[in-house]
Amino acid sequence: MGNLQRCSVKKLAMNGFVVLLTATLLAACASVPDDESAPPPPTVGQEEVSSAGATCNIDTIQYAIGEPFDEANVPQLQSESSARQVRVLRPGSAATMDYREDRLNIHLESNDMIEALRCG
């Protein structure tokens, strides 16, 4: 075999290797549906809110702003505001941004004084 033929054979082998490698990598990235796929995501509580018809009302609990927070007061604030859920938020705490009309958010200052009351 001449040098020209050897170079062509090497080039052809190298091109074949690159094509095979590319096909293997693409096949690895392909998603194959399986029978055990994840269930659909849940709805965002719309059934719960609409079935109860309850909405939070902070007008009846404004007296609590500026008062010291106590876990024992949570049921009273929840009942008076007609909220189905209560979330206590301290400074720097993480919270989801989802809006729930039936949730009372109690915002506290660093000294555990009630800074604000909000629905949502």
Image (cartoon, helix red, strand yellow):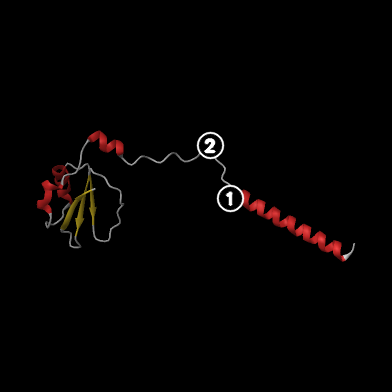
Q: Position of residue 108 (x, y in %)?
A: 19, 57
Quarter the N terminus occupies: bottom right
Q: How far across and how far down the image is residue 68, in percent?
A: 13, 57
Sequence-first disc among 1 and 2: 1
The residue at the far top in this view is 51
Identify the residue shown where x is 20% and y is 62%.
110
Q: Counting other residues with Cα less than 10 Å from the Cα at mark 2, is it few (<14), some (14-19), or many (20 or more)?
A: few
Residue 30 located left or right of residue 93:
right
Q: Is residue 28 left or right of residue 6?
A: left
Foreground residue among 19 and 68: 19
Residue at 78% of width from left, 58% of height from top? Answer: 12
Q: Secondary structure at mark 1?
A: helix
- Residue pointed to by mark 1: 29
Location of residue 83 with respect to 11 vertically, above or below: above
Helix, strand or loop at mark 2? loop
Q: x%, y% of residue 27?
A: 62, 48
Residue at image mark 2: 35
